Image: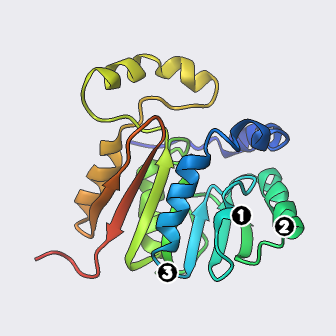
Amino acid sequence: MSVTYDLDGQKKVYRIWARFYDKIYVGLLARAQREAVDAAVACGRDILEIGVGTGLTLPYFPADKRVVGVDLSEDMLRVAGQKVAERKLTAVTGLSVMDACRLGLPDEAFDAVTAQFVITLVPNPEQALDEMDRVLRPGGEIVISSRLVDSGGASAVFWSALAPLAKAVGWSTDFKVSRLTDWAERTGRYRTEHVGRGYFKVVRLKKLASRPA
């Protein structure tokens, strides 16, 4: 199945969002973002944040880490860069414009890769996960936080029914956790380390040091 990328359209939307994103989301997303950052920093020093946006998560990283942030939107990154400079966020070693599905980064360069509130927005989530896998070292973790739906039960039906309305305002309500865990199982290189609960969930996928026997 071919995938159509409307990257220019996404960039136009993010150009508008960049002006007031923080005011809307700084409190709403803080719990899941902090949980995801804590999981990432426990993996090691070198961390990649995909979809870093305006840099809401960047103040949460300890100074002894080396964090690279990438995003599709140059306008979002401009706000993040101002934040890094004003708050002297020394953990941040680079901010770059990149497509999550085509990362211009070397293989096995990071101890953890986080993608916060972005996996449901990329045109091909599995391709983005493949790229995260490529740049992640064995033993590290892919840490996803987003609005994710449990695979079964009445709540999944409810959120799926609301999907068209949510899409109109840029949200996804029918992206299932199983889409991530099934990808991890198919690779043969990952195990699902953690699946959180609540409206916003954190999912941690652990890259094995070697393939299971």
Quadrant of the rendered structure where residue 20 is? top right
The residue that disc 3 covers is 44
Label 2 crowding class (10 Å Cα cut-off): few <14, some 14-19, many 20+?
A: few
Dots 2 and 1: beta carbons under 8 Å?
yes
Label 3 crowding class (10 Å Cα cut-off): few <14, some 14-19, many 20+?
A: some
Cα separation between marks 2 and 3: 23 Å
Is 158 drawn above or below residue 204 in the view shown?
Answer: above
Q: Work out whether mark 3 precedes mark 1 in sequence or the reverse, and give the earlier one.
A: 3
- Residue 175's x, y, as percent? 41, 36
Query: Which label is found at residue 186?
Result: none
Quadrant of the rendered structure where residue 205 is? bottom left
Query: Which label is found at residue 59?
Result: 1
For the question of whether residue 118 can be seen, the reply is no
Amino acid type, mark 2: Arg
From the viewer's perspective, is 57 left or right of 194? right
At 47% from the left and 65% from the top, the residue drawn is 39
Q: Secondary structure at mark 2?
A: helix
At 73% from the left and 57% from the top, the residue drawn is 55
The residue that disc 2 covers is 87
Cα separation between marks 3 and 1: 17 Å
Q: Secondary structure at mark 3?
A: loop
Amino acid type, mark 1: Pro
- Residue 40's x, y, as percent? 50, 68
Relative to the observer, which residue lies in front, 153 or 163?
153
- Assign the N terminus to one quadrant of the image: top left
